[in-house]
Structure formats: C-alpha cells, structure tokens
Image: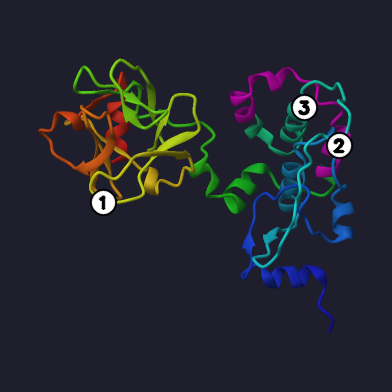
C-alpha cells in the first residue's frame, strides 16, 4: 500500500524536531494542504508576519511542522530592497496585528501590551480570514501554547517578571565605576546596568551581556550578545555581601583599582573590590529565584 505524504510526515515527527514557527520563505509543504489553508494571507503587505500566520494555522488547523535535521537552505540578502518604497507606513506592524487578531485570540492583548501603537493600526478586512478559521475548525491559540510551544512561555513569558536589580552599578570603592564599553573599571564614569530576570547582566538599553568563558583566575569579563540561555552569562547577586557571583565558574566579579581591569577571582566576602551596589534591588524577586 502506498504511503501518503501526510503519513510520511507523521512517521518522521519522532525523528525530526517539532517546530512551532518557521521562517516564511523556508517551508516545504504539500501544495494541496497549502491551498486548503488559504495559502499566505493576501492581506499581508510587502513582508513581515507571514512566518507566524502560516505557522499558526498549520498547527491550529490540523497540520504539523517539523525541522529536517539534514536540510540545507541558502538565503542571500540583497544590499538593497528589491522593491520601491511602498509608502505604506508601518506595514510590518499592520501585518502583525492582522495575524494577532485572526489567530491569537485573547493572547493578542499581550502583543498590544508590548506594542501599544499596534492597537490603532488599520489591519484591513479580516472577514475572509476569520471565516477560513471557522470553516477549518481550527483550534484556539491556547492549545497551540499548551501543546506545541509549551516551552516558549517559560523563556518568553507574556508578562515579563520584574528585573532583580537595576541602576548605576558601583564598586564599593567610591572612586571606581564599571564601564561596559571596554569592560573596565574607570574612575568618574557612570553606567546603568540591569540584572534581568534572565539572570544576566546588561548595560541599560543594550542587547549585550557580561560573559565569562573561563574558570581561570583573573579570567576577563567580556561583552557578548545576550542569548538568554544562562551558562556563561548567568549571574547571581548575593545581596547580603553585595557580590556578583558567576555560578558556572564559582568566582566573583572583581576589579583592580589601579589598572581598572574587570576580571573574575575567588569569592572573598571581606574584599571591597568584590562588593557592588545597584541603585535599586528587588529583594523579594532575588530570594524567590534562588
């Protein structure tokens, strides 16, 4: 008996990784199923949002999506937009609103919570898309979060927990400040830092984090793109001793007051250069997380 395409895909689910969302231009999908889902929403303009729109309706409307581990995809970005300026304003925001209004049910409010201006955007006529969802008896977005993307709310909660500490990060020595640009302690500079709920340390309004990759003595502290996976970027603030502990190496953040070098060294409670004060500390959040 011949094996259907859908049966073949189901047989590979245990080998291939289930993927909640896929980039819009990288799908391999059976043509009949694609058009059964209505193809791409024709109301989406230029680009943006199509990856969520098609991914959500594949899962919510009876399909499944997996990553093929041995697949290879090449994507060459142009140095310029291959289309003229459409003059459509925030078309990406409208696309996202369109997807949220059709497929995300009550969870669309979390989108507006983070992008308040989306609420005032005109998403266009949604009648046909909502009728498609009703005709296919698609499942609610809550099912998608519980059954497919069940681990995403833990990493990207709809409402972010409060940060552990923020404000000016100052060495216990009044003449020393932490300067993130060169990862050095420099007298007279003021730098805002946040010990986020991800348990990493970020210069305010930046997407880079303090990162330590070596357990060696005087290991340097570097700035790397924040990845939210903890590891080298995981920090613990010992509120009682005002020390910044790096659990993966067991060392503490330290500073040489002569060279202004920032580095890691064995934790010593009585060492002044290992004591760091934040402008504001959420003590209850710290205690709940450790």
**Image x and y of residue 103, in percent:** 73, 39
| Relative side of 201 to 102, left or right | left
Q: Residue 94 carries which label?
A: 3
> Which of the 4 image quadrants contains residue 152?
top right
Q: Residue furthest bottom?
A: 1
Q: Which structural element holds mark 2?
A: loop
Q: In this figure, which residue is indicated by the disc labeled 1?
A: 216
Kindly check if marks 3 and 2 are in contact, taking CB atoms under 8 A apart as contact.
Answer: no
**Image x and y of residue 121, in percent:** 76, 20
**Image x and y of residue 236, in percent:** 29, 38
| Relative side of 254 to 3, left or right | left
Scheme of image coloration: rainbow
Q: Does the magenta stretch include residue 126?
A: yes
The residues bearing labels 1 and 3 have C-alpha atoms spaced at a distance of 50 Å
Instruction: Pick the quarter of the image with the C terminus.
Output: top left
| Relative side of 94 to 86, left or right | left
The nearer-to-camera label among 3 and 2 is 2
| Main secondary structure along the magenta-highlighted residues | helix
Instruction: Pick the quarter of the image with the N terminus.
Output: bottom right
Magenta segment boundaries in residue numbering: 109-133
Q: In this figure, which residue is indicated by the disc labeled 2?
A: 82
Residue positioned 73% across, 58% down in the render: 73
Q: Residue furthest front?
A: 259
Of marks 2 and 1, which one's residue comes earlier in the chain? 2
Q: Which residue lies furthest to the top in this view?
A: 188
């Amino acid at each position: 008996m011949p094996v259907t395409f859908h049966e073949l895909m189901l047989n590979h689910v245990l080998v291939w990784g289930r993927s909640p969302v896929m980039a819009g231009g990288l799908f391999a999908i059976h043509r009949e199923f694609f058009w059964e889902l209505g193809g791409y929403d024709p109301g989406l303009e230029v680009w943006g949002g199509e990856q969520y729109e098609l991914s959500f309706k594949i899962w919510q409307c009876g399909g499944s999506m997996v990553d093929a581990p041995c697949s290879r995809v090449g994507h060459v970005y142009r140095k310029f937009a291959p289309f003229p300026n459409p003059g459509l304003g925030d078309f990406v925001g409208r696309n996202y609103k369109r997807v949220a209004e059709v497929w995300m049910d009550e969870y669309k409010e979390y989108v507006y919570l983070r992008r308040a201006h989306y609420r005032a955007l005109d998403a266009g006529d949604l009648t046909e898309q909502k009728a498609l969802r009703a005709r296919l008896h698609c499942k609610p977005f809550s099912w998608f979060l519980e059954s497919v993307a069940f681990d995403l709310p833990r990493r990207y909660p709809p409402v972010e927990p409060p940060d552990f500490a923020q404000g000016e990060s100052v060495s216990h020595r009044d003449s020393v400040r932490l300067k993130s640009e060169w990862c050095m302690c420099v007298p007279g500079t003021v730098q805002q830092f946040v010990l986020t709920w991800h348990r990493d340390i970020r210069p305010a309004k930046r997407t880079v984090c303090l990162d330590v990759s070596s357990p060696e003595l005087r290991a340097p502290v570097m700035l790397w793109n924040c990845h939210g996976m903890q590891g080298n970027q995981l920090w613990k603030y010992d509120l009682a001793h005002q020390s910044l502990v790096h659990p993966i190496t067991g060392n503490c953040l330290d500073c040489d007051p002569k060279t202004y070098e920032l580095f890691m060294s064995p934790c010593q409670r009585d060492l002044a250069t290992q004591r760091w004060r934040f402008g504001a500390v959420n003590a209850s959040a710290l205690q709940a997380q450790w």
